Amino acid sequence: SAVISQKPSRDICQRGTSLTIQCQVDSQVTMMFWYRQQPGQSLTLIATANQGSEATYESGFVIDKFPISRPNLTFSTLTVSNMSPEDSSIYLCSTRDGYTFGSGTRLTVV
Amino acid sequence: GENVEQHPSTLSVQEGDSAVIKCTYSDSASNYFPWYKQELGKGPQLIIDIRSNVGEKKDQRIAVTLNKTAKHFSLHITETQPEDSAVYFCAGGGTSYGKLTFGQGTILTVHP
């Protein structure tokens, strides 16, 4: 199974700003997934990122708010744009190779 | 799309007892059902999984059963230990699109 490293592990951001989260995988993978976990809640899929094509967003998530890049088969970024306190969550990436997760990015918006 | 329901939301057991968590799914095309353990401040850790061509899978104290006809699957933990205390999530999916839908989670507390 793929081993996933995620950065940053946590951050506190001002409302109205943006944060880019990085996800690095130790092997080449076709699909990468970005999830959001709101406080005390389950995981909700934001989008699926394939290399060489635009990400596919789930209902309720839009590219302007959560732009995703997938420049190669081992790396992806998720940006949380124009943040509000409601964006305070844990953001996680995963892959189809073993369906393992990174340790997550704990975001607090103040 | 897929819908996964998980029960119970909380489960409290004594050390040494067994714990069972159940999930149902809606999409008969789903073929992959993993279980995750999440400890405070950490990402979900895959603890066991099962594919639709298998009815049961065991790994030491942990087992998962799948009933495709009824569209439900269960996690069984035997001889529970305090370190088993965590939030457990089931998930279903894994079709050609690869994405998973998660259950709501179960907070398991094992009392010494």
Image: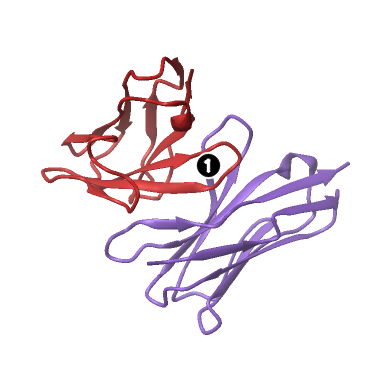
Query: Residue B19: horizontal and vertical position, in percent?
Result: 76, 59
Instruction: Give the residue furthest to the left.
Output: A52
Residue farthest to the bottom? Answer: B69
**Residue denoted by label 1:** B44
Q: Where is residue A78 in the image (x, y as percent from the top left)?
A: 29, 32
- Tell me if residue B57 comes above or below residue A33 in the rendering: below
Q: Is residue B52 above or below residue A23?
A: below
The residue positioned 40% from the left and 70% from the top of the image is B30
Q: Nearer the viewer, residue B71 or A72?
A: B71
Q: Is residue A29 left or right of residue B109?
A: left
Q: What residue type is labelled 1?
A: Pro
Q: Find chain B in the image and tell me its colour.
A: purple
Snapshot quadrant of residue B96: bottom left
Q: What element carries label 1?
A: loop
Residue lying at 79% horizontally and 41% vertically, measured from the top left: B82
Residue B53 at least partly seen = yes
Q: How many labels does the image show?
A: 1
At which x and y percent is residue B103? 55, 57
